[in-house]
Amino acid sequence: MIDKMGYDRSITMFSPDGRLLQVEYAKKSVRQAPTGLAMACKDGVVFISDKYLISKLIVPEAVEKMFKVDDHIALTAAGLIADARVLVDRVQLRAQQHTVTYDSKIDILSVVKEISDLKQICTQSAGLRPFGVSLLVGGVEEDGTVKLYLTEPYGLYFQYQAAAIGEGETEVQAQLEKRYKPSMTVQEGLKLGLNILKDYLKSDFNANRVDAAFINKETRKFTKLDDDEIKRLVK
């Protein structure tokens, strides 16, 4: 009944029960996307994502779900990846400008706020639409602090120790809540995350369709695992 009244045709119009339907639709696009997860470990941050190759003819390396913002900050996305690229391009430029201007690396929260502010503007401006993507943004600060944030399509963000996004969000998050420990190392986090994703995907799991990466606390460098390294970590 609500959609027939036109409340889902505008992002600036609330329905009588206080909902912004276009924003809800943006969140649905995330829930239908392949799963991503990330963890803040004692010696770095871990990112894992399911790329879900829609054709056997697609080159796996050509499918991007994980992006480096700067050496010490990265993110993984679930939802409309084209939307994610727009946000990534923006914060990559912002990070470069910060380095040139202040001769120091941008902090993680500034990147998260830049993303979230743009997302929020797109929920209340005519002629725009919400970004249909959630992002897990993490990294290592100059003082060695490891941080991880989740940003929603409508601009809300929270800091997490471990989080999941995408179609497997509920199941994977439940497993993280049971099995994740802040004292885990990056290697332990990678092993846990990959095996949780394997348990969720079951027979569909394949090293070719999974991306795994980390940022080490000591080097503050973004590093991606190859297929052989992923296979060694999966039980």
Image (tube, rainbow, N blue to C red):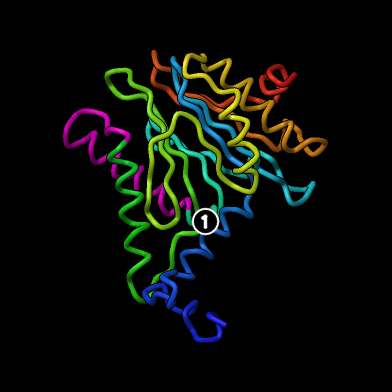
Q: Is residue 61 magenta?
A: no
**Image: 134 above or below 176:** below
Mark 1: few/some/many CA within 10 Å (<14, 14-19, 20+): few
At x 39% / y 20%, what residue is drawn?
220
Q: Which residues are magenta?
A: 84-108
Prevailing SS of the magenta stretch: helix
Q: Is residue 133 above or below residue 223?
A: below
Q: Residue drawn at (42%, 46%), measured in percent from left and top?
A: 151
Name the residue located 22 percent from the left edge and 28 percent from the top edge. 104
Q: Residue at x 83, y 36 (%)?
A: 203
Res 105 → quadrant: top left
Q: Is residue 71 at all visible to an observer of this figure? A: no
Q: Which residue is mark 1?
A: 82
Percent position of residue 208, x then y? 72, 34
Q: Nearer the viewer, residue 194 or 12?
A: 12
Q: Is residue 3 above or below residue 170?
A: below
> From where the camera sits, is residue 137 visible?
yes
Q: Is residue 75 left or right of residue 190?
A: left
- Looking at the rendered image, the quarter that the C terminus falls into is top right
- Residue 130 found in image quarter: bottom left
Q: Is residue 104 magenta?
A: yes
Image: 64 above or below 124: above
Which residue type carries mark 1?
A: Ala
